[in-house]
Amino acid sequence: MRLDKLLANMGYGSRKEIKKLCKNGAVKVDGKPVKDSSVHVDPDAQEVEIFGEVVHYREFVYLMMNKPQGVISATEDAVEETVVDLLAPEFFAFDVFPVGRLDKDTEGLLLLTNDGKLAHELIAEEACSQALLCTGRGTGDRRRPGGIPQRRHAGRRVQNAAGRAYDSYPGKRLGDRAYHL
């Protein structure tokens, strides 16, 4: 990978700015100053420093956030505070985005990443097998005389917003896909 691309991806400036930093001797590879920013480096095998600080290159980042209420699941918004606004400055250079959405007034686990392929695998309809637990009026939660709830039977067919039908199973997780980050 080119040195200027690596440093630009890590948020140290544009490629043009990195070129100037190299000419001024601010960048070292394996302890030696590098004047040519187009030199190729292996971030796993070589140590890159800028202003004496070692650069730890990461192509992808995976962040888990407990999204608080009142924050929107977006990367930017002119009016509302977003989940990206809550991140530590060290993650700004990675251009992370939320995988999926939680409503503004909902709190809960939210994954943020810059790995578009993984995000697509996690939320694409054709890649997901869904288990839906239906509760509430009109979905099988029937009351017997006297107000005693009747158990809902497994196997009820339900539809998601796209009109795709699924079998619902109370208390069971469907699917065989697991992701370890």
Image: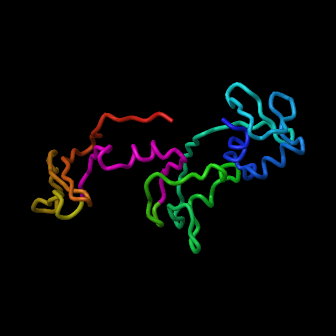
Q: Residues in magenta? A: 107-135
Kindly give the residue lying farthest to the top in the view shown.
45
| Residue depicted at 75% across the width and 49% down the height | 12
| Residue at the (73%, 38%) spot, across then down | 3
Which quarter of the figure has residue 40?
top right
Q: Residue furthest left?
A: 145
* 6 on left or right of 152: right
Q: Give percent across and percent down for residue 53.
A: 82, 39
Left or right: residue 40 versus residue 70 is: right
Instruction: Name the side, left or right, on which 44 lies relative to 144.
Output: right
- Please tell me whether residue 129 is drawn above or below residue 150 in the rendered image: above
Figure colour scheme: rainbow
- The residue closer to the viewer here, 63 or 24, is 24
Q: Nearer the viewer, residue 44 or 41?
A: 41
Please check the rendered image and state whether residue 132 is part of the magenta-colored stretch, yes or no.
yes
> Height in image: 74 above or below 89?
below
